[in-house]
Structure formats: structure tokens, C-alpha cells
Image (cartoon, coloured by chain):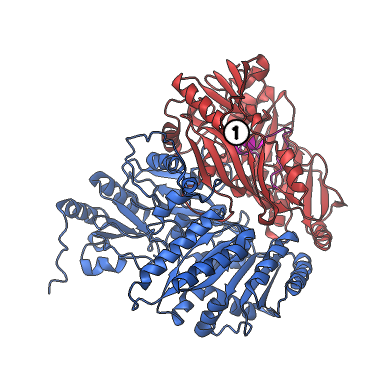
Amino acid sequence: MTAATATRRPGTPDDAVNGVVPGEVVRPTSVEEVAELLKAATADRRTVVPAGGRSKLTWAAPPSSCDLLLDTTGLDRVVEHVAGDLTVVAEAGVRLADLQARVGDAGQVLALDPPEEGATLGGVVSANASGPRRLRYGTVRDLLIGITVVLADGTVAHAGGKVVKNVAGYDLGKLYTGAHGTLGVVVSTTWRLHPVPPARRVVVLELPDASAAGPLAIALNRSTLTPSAVELVAEAGGAGRLVVVFESIAESVSAQARQAVELMGGGAELDEVPADLGRRPGGPDDVLLRLAYVPTGLTDVLAALPAGTHLAASAGTGVAYAAVPAADAAGALPAVRAALAPHDGSAVLLHAPEAVRDQLDHWGPVGDALDLMRRVKERFDPERLMSPGRFVGGL
Amino acid sequence: MTALAETPVSSRTADLAAGLRAAVGAERVLTDRVQTRTYECDGLANFKVTPAIVVLAESRQHVVDCVRLCSEAGVPFVARGSGTGLSGGALPSADGVLLVLSRLRRLGPVDADNAQVTVEPGVINLWVTRDAAPHDLLYAPDPSSQLVCSIGGNVAENAGGAHCLKYGFTVNHVLGAEVVLPDGEVVHLGGRAPEHPGYDLLGAFIGSEGTLGVATELTLRLIRVPEEVQTMLVGYHSVEDAAGTVSDIIAAGIVPAAVEMMDALAIEAAEAAVSCGYPEGATAVLVIELDGPKAEVEAQFAQVEEIAGTRNAFEVRIAADADERALMWKGRKSAFAAVGRISPSYYVQDGVIPRTKLPEVLAEMKRMADAKGLRVANVFHAGDGNLHPLVLFDDAVEGQAHEAEELAGDILEQCITSGGSITGEHGVGQEKRMKMAKQFTPEDLDTMQLVRCAFDPDGVANPGKVFPTPRLCGERPGVRTGEHPVQAAGLGEVF
């Protein structure tokens, strides 16, 4: 059963996790191998950081140590796709794009659309990555129906199952969503799928002043329209573009697009979704933040960002990605967090150039449940070997 | 007659009762057995335990005081809302405190622009939608008991309802919770905004059946009332045709708001109870509801009607207005209670199977029932494979109650074997905890227990529920080797 086919090699600077070069990189190809590797690592007290497509490795703080980079891309099997049940089971190293192609053949889709290229399912779960269609379909927590994880001591545990409706036992899938590898390694995932809507229609509205987007997004939320996405692309203090995507049957998308134009007082209709929909703003030299707030906070968010900040917001949901010029970041971050506070908001660092990385507080305030989170971490990883230091509160 | 005399309790609980009276007020602490017996069971009446002490909390502070005193005294507590749960999740501990939350009933103002509202746990499910309605909003989770069940209980059980096929369950509609941990500490999980930094402990808390703490405030997500709702009632001469219709609807890429099925026995019961006027002579009926933008609903509704025709539906009835829709739903929503009209006793089961296994599981269920000479009425959320078989029996017949319980258990094992779950919405509670070991491996259960130990290291919050064997948090369970029980029994390999 356990063919020892894991490949091992020394870590190189190309493998660095936020500047920390791993001692060794190992690529297992089965769940059993992952369990053996982790058990052995724990016995030797070696620290482990899991990584899949490495498209979001910067999204958590640098690890305090990384003896072993556990490359999950060898866990690459789509185990089971039951089209009639709209479910799929796939290992953590399967690339999201490959899974979409596979279920797409049956006219289905996993309704998650984070833009990071090469992302694997394990990484999407561990980083809780999402894209524009979260407005309609929610995020990982709404679509992940089963999970298999390996704990630091090699224990293989399942939770959830293969049916969408299931309340037996604690939902460990929620706990591992966004945990950034600090509680163990996600090795397999089971998802709820959706049918691919047959038609789409997009309304694009140019806004001379981006701050007009906030009230428009709320008006769309309060209408009977059911857009898949309402995305704002803007520059703080400047202009913006609001993109409203409708996906349904042909009769419905054309009717809804018409109503949206009327409701927003303008807008041009397109037949196809723009290819860059949901693209994260900025480049490698910018500091990329994920901002979250109650949806009505968007206007204040725009006002709080330093001029020149590029922003891409899922305007109806209260989540935005902001690319702050690196030079401004250290000064701007506390001010942005303060402006978000009345909106129950948070600002998390997703990427920072090396030069400024250490000056920035990665996670910001966590609230009064931090001690409880610490106790959870202590139970799952008592030796603190899994992605140590990457998460909130130094977990 | 000494009805007003104190129940004889151990000195530990007597001291606790005194401490509770001092903390929350004597009028909110019941120890008289006549009064505490009122709370001996929840909606699952075949388990009964009279609690030593009942606390009627009216504020967060009462909950904090009660939980802290219990923790200090090492006395278990069980939180309870309206007591409509169907798995014995709110079954009291004989030597413990039953913490009743139904007086925590404040609803905050609806934040219409952000589509949310913050409420206390004793608030009744339907009140949320009532308050949201003037803003054209609604609260999506709609368990059949929504007239009486509480939001706190819904959160504990991760309650579903008929419309979760499209809209999801309670966990998809709770944004934040204020939680009193089992040692009395107050924490805030999630909030009004999405994506709070840190572990998604809110997600772990929802559906934990009162074993991780007590919610004292919940922020709920509301959704826009859809532009159009259309409902049809379809009659069939065969269950297979009804099941086939469901598969074809899904295959056509349609996600209905709800697809409910009832078989002949369930129809007979509903008819006897509420005269819902379902198609005469039907072996199965489907209640199918679509909602959303008008153009979408109209086109897809016509498509569904066509599918039903190709699957030999002998009658398709379309609700002309809200009253007709309500009547269609009345038959479905009253089905559990209605079964009392055709059988002296019945056992409500809740299991889930992959939707595509519906015909074969139904056939197997009938075979198992026939072998025991029992009748099973089937009511289910067909769209998501959530079965509610009602096993009918007569207490007066020697041994039949036991046979019925056994059959209900066998049905659950059938659900597990087919790749499903032992509960889709009623929870594990007291009733199904032994079945957990059939659905999950010892390693799975030990790992879940780690969460429990982080929240409740002393095991005072609703002990003895959900998990088959209580475990002390001090001992870290060793990794076991050997076959999974499901594999060992030859029941399956993937779970």
C-alpha cells in the first residue's frame, strides 16, 4: 500500500517561504506517505510547512523555522466525480484549473474563482482564497463538504463526507479553511459543485469618482437582481469601474442586465466576462492587503487608502484587495486598520516586498478569541511544528 | 404532600443551587422536582432525564454566572432553547444544570443595507423573517419547526430546512456569535464583517450541539426576498418516477429552492391531519419550488413541468397564489406530526444519502421494513438526499418498539453504506452517538475531540452527547492501527 515514492531534495532559495529557505523539500504521492513523513518529522522535532502550487505562499507571515517543505503537488488524483450528485472528491495537490476542466466536461463548476494561477485545492482551502463569484456562491466554507487531513503526529482524520447536507460530528473543514497549514496538512477535499449557467451578460459602469460604487453596490444587493459578481476596480481618490456579472439562462441575463443599467443610471452591456475580472491589484513591488468590512464600509475604505492605491473589491460582500505602494505601507496600515474598525473590519497582509516585510504587522488585531485559537493550536500541534509562526498571534 | 420541598440533591448541587440563586436571583433557579420535570426531554421524548437544577437565564450575565459556577463546581450543564430538537441534544444531566435560554429573546434592529440582524439565542426562527420582511429580506434556514424553534438551538444543531438545497444551512447564514465558553469566558467568533483573521472557530462552533459553549448573541445574514416564487405539486404512480424527476431536474442544470418528496403513507397521514388535497391515488408526490428573477423562474418552471411529464407524472398542480402555495407546504411541513393519525407511535429518522442512490436505498428500506413487518412512511428533502423515514409501530404490541428502533438504526447504516451520513439536520445528540463510530474512524473522532478539549477541557458542556465515548482531555489518545469498523464489517472503503 505504501510505496515509498516520495522524492526528496535540499531546499533552494527558489523554495523560500517569505524569505525562509527550507532545509529539505519532499514531495509525497500518497496520503500514507504524508502520514509517515509527518510522524517521522515529529519524532525528529523538525518543522514542516506544506505548500501546493505556491501561488499564495506569501499570504501568511514568514515561518519561524522550516526544516521541511512538504510539496503536496504529488497528491494529484481526482478521486471521484459524481455528476448526478454534483460532488467531487479530489486530492489536495490537484490544481483548481485542472479540476474545473474535469468537472466542466459535465457542465459543472466548483464555484470558487480565486485568480492565482497554478493554485491547488489544498492551498485554496488553507489560504481561504476566493474571487468575484463569492457574492453568489460564498467561499470555501460554503462549498467544502468533506476533508481529510494529516496531523503533525501522522494521524489521518476525516470530517464531513460526500453529501452536501450532513451535520454529524464537528466540521473540521471549517477549522482548516484559512489555517495556513498550522494545524496539519490538508490531503483531500470533497466539494459541492454547481451547474455552469448557460448564458452570461455583463454591465460595465465607468465611475469618475470611485466612491460612488459603495451606494450602487448596496442598491444592487437590495434589488431582486442576482448577479454572480459585483466588482469594483479603482484607484483611491480617483476613478473606478464597476463590473456587474449576470450568469443564468439567456432570458434572465438580458432582463437583469437591462434592469441593472436602469438601477445604476447607466452602463455598457457586454456578452462576455472580462478576462481580468477579479485580478488582484498591483505588482510584486506593492504591498497587497486583503480588507474585510461590512459592505456599507466601502466608501470609508476608499477614503482611508493612500492616494495611488489600486483596489479590486467584491463590492457587494465587503471584501477588497488593495495594492499600497511599498513606501507608504508602514504608515498607511495602522490608519487603514483604524478606519476599518467601525466597520468591524480587518486588514491582512497578503504580500509585501522583502524590503518592507519585517516592518509590517501581518495580521493586525485578532479580537478576544485569540487565546482560544492558541488552545486549538496546542491541541492539534502541541510541539508547534506545523508552519510555526505563520498565523495570528505567532501561532 | 411535599411538592414544594427541595429535591434531595447531593451537597455539591445544593451548594451550586445556592450559589446560582445568589448570582442570578432565586426566582430564576428551579430545583423543585415538579418544576424541573417540565424540562426532562426535548423533541425526542423517548429519552427523559429530570435535571437537578434549571436556570432560566434572562441576560448574558446570567449565562456567564451560571456557566462559571458550574465550571467551578465541576457540575455539567446543558443549554436548551425551545426544546424542539429531535436527537436528544438538550437532554439534561440528572446531576447537572439545565440552562434555559428561551427568555433571551431580544432582536436587534435589522441592518437592511448590510442585510444582517443581531439576535439573542431564544429568539424564534420565524421572528427573524417577520422582522426582516418590511425590508424585503428574509432569514433562509427554515426548519419545519420554525414557528417554535429558537435560533440558539438552530445554531447548536446547524439546522436545515426545506430550502437548504439552494440556500444552505444555518452555518451559511450566521456571520458572528458571542459565545460563553465552558469556563465562563466570553469570546466573539466571526462578527458583522466577513473574513475575520484567525481560525474559523465560528464554523466549528455551529453544529457542535452545545458541547463547545453557549451562544448569547448571534449575527445572522439575511437574503433578499426573491422577485418570483413558483411552486408545483406533482403526483406520481411510482416512487422511481418521482426520484427520476429529481435527477433530471439537477441534470438540466436547475437548482430549485426546494424539492420535497412524500410517499403514499406519508401522503395518507398528511391528508388525514390537514386535508392538504394532494393528488388522489398518488404513490409519491413532489413539492418543487423555484425562486429568483422572474424570467429565470418562469422559463425553468416550464422546463421542470416538462421533465415531470416525461417521468409519467399524472398530475401537475401549480400554486396560483400564496395561499395555494401555503397549502402545498402545509401537507409537507405537518407530515411528522400527521403520522400520529395513522399509527399509535412512530420513530422519526434523519439520514442522508447521495441523491443518485435514492431509488436503490428506498427499495432496500422497503425490503428491511417488510422483513420486520413494519411500515415506513417517507418524507424527504429529495433535492439533497436527506431522508426522514418515519418508522410506524404500536407500543401496545410486545417488542414492536424495539423492532422499530432497530429498523431505524438499520436504515442509518444503509445511509452510511451508500456514502451518506447518519444525520442531515437533526444532529447526533444523545440518540445517535453510538452510530458515530460507524461513520467515522477512531482517529476521526479523536481529532474532533481535540476541538472539544480546546473549548471545554473539563468536559462540562453537554457531556455524553455527540461522541460515543467520553474522553479525558489530559490523555492524548495514541494513534490506533487496524481496520476502520466500516471496512472491517465489509460495509465500504470510502467514507
Residue B277 pos. (x, y %): 60, 84
In the image, residue A109 sits, relative to residue B283, either above or below, namely above
Residue positioned most to the left: B1
Which amino acid lies under the numbered mark 1 shown in the image of this protein? Val
Q: Report the number of numbered marks.
A: 1
Q: Is residue B351 visible?
A: yes
Q: Is residue B288 visible?
A: no
In the image, residue A329 sits, relative to residue A108, either above or below, namely above
Quadrant in which residue B302 is drawn: bottom right
Residue B89 pos. (x, y %): 39, 58
Between A81 and B481, the one nearer to me in the picture: B481
Question: Disc 1 is attached to a residue of which chain?
Answer: A
Secondary structure, mark 1, is strand
Mark 1 crowd level (few <14, some 14–19, many ≥20, 10 Å Cα) = many
Between A157 and A249, the one nearer to me in the picture: A157
- Where's the N terminus of chain A, which quadrant? top right
State the hue of chain B.
blue
Q: What residue did someone put label 1 on?
A: A348
Left or right? Give the position of B88 relative to A62: left
Between A394 and A66, the one nearer to me in the picture: A66
Quadrant in which residue A208 is drawn: top right
State the hue of chain A.
red
Is residue A117 shown in magenta? yes
Q: Does the magenta stretch mainly form a helix, a strand or a loop?
A: loop
Give the residues drawn in magenta, as a range: A110-129
Quadrant in which residue B71 is drawn: top left
Residue B93 pos. (x, y %): 28, 56
Is residue A261 shown in magenta? no
